Amino acid sequence: MPTAVYAPPAKAIIHFARALGAARSGDLATAQVDIDKLSELKAALEGTNQPHWVGQVEVQILAAQAWLLHGRGDRAEASRLMQAAASLKDGSEKHVASDCIQCASCSPTSRWNKGRRLQRLTSTKRR
Protein backbone atom coordinates (compact mmCIF):
# COMPACT_ATOMS: atom_id res chain seq x y z
CA MET A 1 0.00 0.00 0.00
CA PRO A 2 1.32 3.49 -0.76
CA THR A 3 2.78 4.99 2.41
CA ALA A 4 1.33 8.44 1.68
CA VAL A 5 -2.26 7.24 2.20
CA TYR A 6 -3.33 8.22 5.72
CA ALA A 7 -7.07 8.88 5.62
CA PRO A 8 -9.12 5.81 6.60
CA PRO A 9 -11.62 6.29 3.72
CA ALA A 10 -8.75 6.33 1.21
CA LYS A 11 -7.19 3.25 2.81
CA ALA A 12 -10.59 1.57 2.64
CA ILE A 13 -10.80 2.12 -1.11
CA ILE A 14 -7.41 0.46 -1.53
CA HIS A 15 -8.40 -2.56 0.59
CA PHE A 16 -11.77 -2.77 -1.18
CA ALA A 17 -10.05 -2.92 -4.57
CA ARG A 18 -7.55 -5.49 -3.31
CA ALA A 19 -10.32 -7.64 -1.81
CA LEU A 20 -12.31 -7.59 -5.05
CA GLY A 21 -9.27 -8.42 -7.16
CA ALA A 22 -8.24 -11.25 -4.85
CA ALA A 23 -11.75 -12.72 -4.63
CA ARG A 24 -12.33 -12.55 -8.36
CA SER A 25 -8.96 -14.13 -9.13
CA GLY A 26 -9.53 -16.98 -6.67
CA ASP A 27 -7.17 -15.84 -3.91
CA LEU A 28 -9.83 -16.10 -1.22
CA ALA A 29 -7.43 -15.99 1.73
CA THR A 30 -6.03 -12.64 0.61
CA ALA A 31 -9.55 -11.35 -0.01
CA GLN A 32 -10.45 -12.22 3.58
CA VAL A 33 -7.37 -10.39 4.90
CA ASP A 34 -8.45 -7.21 3.09
CA ILE A 35 -12.06 -7.61 4.23
CA ASP A 36 -10.79 -7.88 7.80
CA LYS A 37 -8.78 -4.69 7.27
CA LEU A 38 -11.93 -2.97 5.97
CA SER A 39 -13.69 -4.00 9.19
CA GLU A 40 -10.85 -2.48 11.23
CA LEU A 41 -11.06 0.76 9.25
CA LYS A 42 -14.82 0.88 9.72
CA ALA A 43 -14.39 0.45 13.48
CA ALA A 44 -11.86 3.30 13.50
CA LEU A 45 -14.24 5.53 11.53
CA GLU A 46 -17.10 4.77 13.93
CA GLY A 47 -15.11 6.61 16.58
CA THR A 48 -15.16 9.78 14.48
CA ASN A 49 -17.99 12.02 13.41
CA GLN A 50 -18.00 10.73 9.81
CA PRO A 51 -21.17 8.66 9.36
CA HIS A 52 -20.99 8.98 5.56
CA TRP A 53 -17.65 7.18 5.43
CA VAL A 54 -18.75 4.55 7.96
CA GLY A 55 -21.63 3.74 5.62
CA GLN A 56 -19.42 3.68 2.54
CA VAL A 57 -16.97 1.28 4.16
CA GLU A 58 -19.92 -0.93 5.17
CA VAL A 59 -20.97 -1.01 1.49
CA GLN A 60 -17.42 -2.01 0.57
CA ILE A 61 -17.39 -4.76 3.20
CA LEU A 62 -20.70 -6.20 2.02
CA ALA A 63 -19.68 -6.11 -1.65
CA ALA A 64 -16.28 -7.66 -0.96
CA GLN A 65 -17.87 -10.38 1.21
CA ALA A 66 -20.32 -11.07 -1.62
CA TRP A 67 -17.48 -11.64 -4.08
CA LEU A 68 -15.70 -13.83 -1.53
CA LEU A 69 -18.80 -15.99 -1.08
CA HIS A 70 -19.26 -16.07 -4.85
CA GLY A 71 -15.72 -17.42 -5.12
CA ARG A 72 -16.55 -20.08 -2.52
CA GLY A 73 -19.58 -21.13 -4.57
CA ASP A 74 -22.26 -19.78 -2.22
CA ARG A 75 -24.18 -17.89 -4.91
CA ALA A 76 -27.38 -17.39 -2.89
CA GLU A 77 -25.67 -15.72 0.07
CA ALA A 78 -23.39 -13.77 -2.27
CA SER A 79 -26.42 -12.40 -4.08
CA ARG A 80 -28.11 -11.50 -0.79
CA LEU A 81 -25.04 -9.58 0.41
CA MET A 82 -24.65 -7.80 -2.93
CA GLN A 83 -28.30 -6.74 -2.80
CA ALA A 84 -27.75 -5.46 0.75
CA ALA A 85 -24.70 -3.49 -0.42
CA ALA A 86 -26.64 -2.02 -3.35
CA SER A 87 -29.57 -1.05 -1.12
CA LEU A 88 -27.29 0.59 1.42
CA LYS A 89 -25.43 2.43 -1.33
CA ASP A 90 -28.66 3.58 -2.99
CA GLY A 91 -29.87 5.02 0.31
CA SER A 92 -26.66 6.88 1.08
CA GLU A 93 -25.69 10.46 0.46
CA LYS A 94 -23.68 10.74 -2.75
CA HIS A 95 -20.07 11.81 -2.59
CA VAL A 96 -17.89 12.35 -5.66
CA ALA A 97 -14.91 10.54 -4.13
CA SER A 98 -16.72 7.23 -3.72
CA ASP A 99 -19.43 7.17 -6.36
CA CYS A 100 -17.11 6.86 -9.32
CA ILE A 101 -15.59 3.73 -7.75
CA GLN A 102 -18.79 2.07 -6.56
CA CYS A 103 -21.35 3.29 -9.07
CA ALA A 104 -24.30 1.06 -9.81
CA SER A 105 -23.30 0.50 -13.44
CA CYS A 106 -19.91 -0.86 -12.31
CA SER A 107 -21.24 -2.97 -9.45
CA PRO A 108 -20.58 -6.70 -9.26
CA THR A 109 -24.33 -7.28 -9.41
CA SER A 110 -24.39 -5.66 -12.84
CA ARG A 111 -21.41 -7.70 -13.92
CA TRP A 112 -23.01 -10.93 -12.66
CA ASN A 113 -26.20 -10.16 -14.55
CA LYS A 114 -24.26 -9.19 -17.68
CA GLY A 115 -22.27 -12.42 -17.38
CA ARG A 116 -25.47 -14.43 -17.08
CA ARG A 117 -26.93 -12.71 -20.15
CA LEU A 118 -23.75 -13.36 -22.13
CA GLN A 119 -23.70 -16.95 -20.96
CA ARG A 120 -27.30 -17.45 -22.09
CA LEU A 121 -26.54 -15.85 -25.45
CA THR A 122 -23.44 -17.95 -25.92
CA SER A 123 -25.18 -21.20 -25.00
CA THR A 124 -28.10 -20.33 -27.31
CA LYS A 125 -25.79 -19.64 -30.25
CA ARG A 126 -23.98 -22.97 -29.80
CA ARG A 127 -27.12 -25.00 -30.34
Image (tube, rainbow, N blue to C red):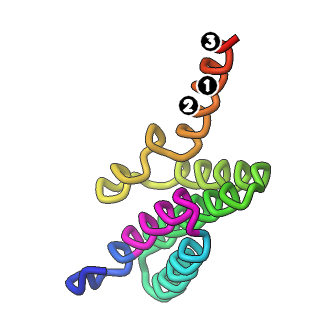
To which quarter of the image does residue 112 belong? Answer: top right
Give, as a three-letter code, the residue at label 1. Answer: Arg
Q: Are discs 1 and 2 less than 8 Å apart at CB?
A: yes
Tag 1 secondary structure: helix
Residue 48 colored in magenta in the image: no
The residue that disc 1 covers is 117
Q: Quadrant of the C terminus?
A: top right
User: Could you say where residue 9 lies in the image, as x and y percent from the top left?
Assistant: 37, 74
Q: Quadrant of residue 36?
A: bottom right
Q: Which residue: 55% across, 61% down?
A: 59
x, y (%) of residue 29? 60, 76
Q: Which mark is residue 125?
A: 3
Name the one closer to the observer, 55 or 37.
37
**Would residue 3 appear left or right of 47 to someone viewing this image?**
left
- The stretch of residues the image draws in magenta is 12-27
Report the amino acid beneath label 2: Lys
The type of residue carrying mark 3 is Lys
